[in-house]
């Protein structure tokens, strides 16, 4: 029998790695999309998944990568949209092209990726799309002029998705990561950083919530965070 | 070895029952507090727990009930504050005493219950307090003049708790139930009501989240809910 | 011709004084309600208004004061609910009776005062009720366990009022004061404190907004505030 | 003596017209920027202002228009960013280029326009930038996938501006228009639509608020609006 397929966009040694590990461990075939495969190819090998180069600022690259995923693994059951590193700086400091890239990565890329996976999800009447948000999704500060603006747009788009796709049986959710992300080598007892695998715990919970009680927005933060 | 103790306040055939079942199933000794034990005593027997009569509008009753719980079962590890049925109606319709009762049940009772359990939790540096909120926690509508006002105060108080107790190792969280609560006899495929045991799934997830990535506020709603 | 009547609840040398001055200046007969008339009687004399002793934690006192206002000045056109000094402290520190008083002052007193003025407003199809909120109306912090909880309940209640009474021609609004309140002796150029008469500027604007474009919630803060 | 200068971006027979009339009436030289000058040239003539063609999706056009404004009228004192008609439709319906245009008009255009005016404002330590938002600024619905996403990003960016520029003496504010906009021919007694000149009343209030008590976010809606 075929494994369910989980696509993770945005692969690095923190969240991307932890999400991939968790879903692979739970029996998913994992497709790892990131700008370069330098890091992701080793992880894919380790997890029996596949790595794909995909710059989400490039619509053609997104189209191409998902076509490959479908050919290699079949229809997508879970999409984890974890792309979204942001340029920090005030509006004075952020170059125009970086400002635009922030929007392309966090917003346009999410729109296109959703379009790529949603067809078969609709046919099955099931599926999950989980987006990695940040405190900046909720407010704009001077030093997050570009990042927060993109994250707020992403949150709004995810809301539109959730409200439209929920009734079709597709669960869209947003995880607001409120704090610095550390590593799994930390015990978590420091209370100052989120362990990626602990975030993955909540992401996996969301992806498997029973449909009579779906969450849209869930915040996660270290227990000593000042918020 | 002694079982961990879970106190559930507000026991009826929906959420209260489902929360008790879930935590009993996971190995907790469950203490069921409700105004009358007519319903809860049977449930307690079924789950190997204990039922206590406790009218949360009465501070002495709260004090007494927790003293009994401690004597019978020991220190409390998890508190599920599920009291909170509200009187609906515009401000024209709600009698003064009902308005006040709404505040006593949702807010003052939560304050007192938290005070009752928090001492040993602080000593251990662990514990969880999960509050059942509602859409009304987030906004006041004409027909929720009393209920929403109490729920908003409850949410704010839970936030104060979370921000203070988090760094002490105690997890405080709020579940926003956004929709009508049905029964576990429903499959959940109708999409119109939340199944109590599906809400319990998220409550249990919160009570066991790793402390590097704690959630404070989580919404849950049926997948067909219009929100 | 009779002057329109403005009742201001909560009179001190800061907001209460500034609101009274502004509305008196704009041609209103001002009724000043506060626990003691030590301060307010001089202000009333100065402004051609009237001072009333009214402890808003006492329902009978509220009933009595409004009866006097109606007898002395007639029906109320504008109610400025400015009561709401709060007890600061964590939930560990705040005594039970102070916690309850916070709710009585900020929430129950607003409910009762609204009931006292709303009848004639409904008959005329006009009137304004403006509530003084605070940052704590929006979130609970450790040191605002009592105050924020009361302020959140007040905000929710004001929302219920606004949604119900708006269509009846009565404007209910909430001003979120986000920052320390200074004095009118300050120029405002310091940027660290709100001048009471500058807050009054926005309160008066709200009380006279044309009804096709009413605001419910308006924040005000000093220009150098860190928020 | 030279008149203060108010630039209004987004000129049509509703808000744009009303804002221009109000600020011209208050003694401002008004510069009207819109994609075409078909409508705005007549209005400019009527108000003794100037009309400029400026497609805000085109960065060069923005740069050019502001250079002209500075040459014709001098430094800008007030910027009213009223561009922002949005494409409605679900994410299935909205073409990629319309989705991108929504972001260019509401977000990138605001960033660039702010950059164009902020230099002299900083030198003077004064100025106002008021942005026209919408209910969609606060939430994404199925039919506002593109519009709400852009409006949420705009709100976040305006927040970043407000927090950074406030301490420099520049007031940035957002007006959330929550309801359908009608015409000034309506009396406002219908309660179903906002009269543009009534919105202008609040915009002008914001532009002239004393700096010790500045608002960032103000909602406006017709008194019969269901919200």
Image (cartoon, coloured by chain):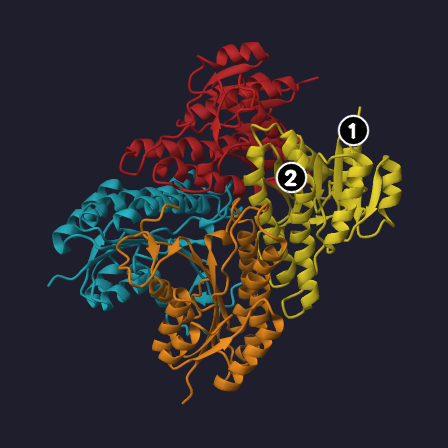
Chain colours: A red, B yellow, C orange, D cyan
Camera-nearest residue between D106 and D125: D125
**Residue B179 shows up from this direction:** no
Q: Is residue C40 left or right of residue A3?
A: left
Residue C214: give x, y in percent of width and height: 44, 65
**Mark number for residue C122?**
none
Number of numbered discs visible in the structure rendering? 2
Report the side of A39 relative to A80 (left or right).
left
Query: To which residue does mark 1 refer?
Result: B3
Residue D150 location (% of width, % of height): 41, 44
Which one is closest to the eye, mark 1 or mark 2?
1
Q: Badge 1: few (under 14), some or many (20 or more) residues near its Cα, within 10 Å?
A: few
Tell me, yes or no, if residue B194 can be seen here.
yes
- Foreground of the two, B126 or A172: B126
Which residue corresponds to mark 2?
A: A214
Answer few, some or many: residues within 10 Å of disc 2's Cα (few below 14, many 20 plus, some between 14 and 19): many
Q: Given the current orientation, which residue lies at the most extreme bottom position?
A: C1
Mark 2 belongs to chain: A
- Secondary structure under tag 2 reads loop
Q: Quadrant of residue C24?
A: bottom left
| Callout 1 touching callout 2 (CB < 8 Å) | no
Judging depth in this view, the residue of B48 and A26 nearest the camera is: B48
Residue at mark 1 shares a chain with residue at mark 2: no
Towards the viewer: B221 or B106 = B106
Q: Above or below — where is A106 with respect to D91?
A: above
Element under label 1? Answer: loop
Q: Is residue C125 above or below residue B112?
A: below
Work out whether B180 lies above or below A215: below
Can you give x and y, in whole percent of width and height, for residue B96 in the image? 67, 67
Going 41% across and 47% down the picture, which residue do you hit? D151
């Amino acid at each position: 029998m075929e494994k369910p397929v989980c696509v993770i966009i945005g692969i690095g040694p923190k969240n991307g790695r932890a999400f991939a590990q968790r879903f692979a461990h739970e029996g998913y075939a994992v497709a790892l999309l990131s700008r370069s495969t330098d890091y992701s190819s080793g992880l894919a090998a380790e997890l029996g998944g596949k790595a794909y180069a995909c710059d989400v600022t490039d619509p053609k690259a997104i189209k191409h990568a998902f076509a490959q995923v479908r050919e290699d693994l079949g229809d997508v059951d879970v999409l984890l949209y974890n792309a979204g590193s942001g340029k920090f700086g005030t509006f004075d400091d952020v170059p125009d092209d970086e400002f635009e890239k922030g929007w392309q990565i966090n917003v346009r890329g999410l729109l296109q990726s959703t379009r790529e996976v949603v067809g078969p999800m609709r046919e099955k009447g099931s599926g999950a799309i989980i987006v990695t948000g940040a405190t900046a999704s909720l407010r704009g500060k001077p030093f997050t002029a570009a990042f927060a603006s993109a994250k707020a747009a992403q949150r709004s788009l995810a809301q539109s998705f959730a409200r439209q796709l929920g009734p079709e049986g597709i669960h869209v959710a947003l995880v607001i990561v409120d704090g610095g992300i550390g590593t799994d080598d930390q015990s978590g007892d420091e209370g100052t950083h989120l362990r990626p695998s602990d975030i993955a715990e909540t992401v996996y919970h969301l992806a498997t919530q029973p449909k009579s009680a779906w969450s849209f927005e869930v915040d996660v933060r270290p227990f000593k965070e000042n918020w």
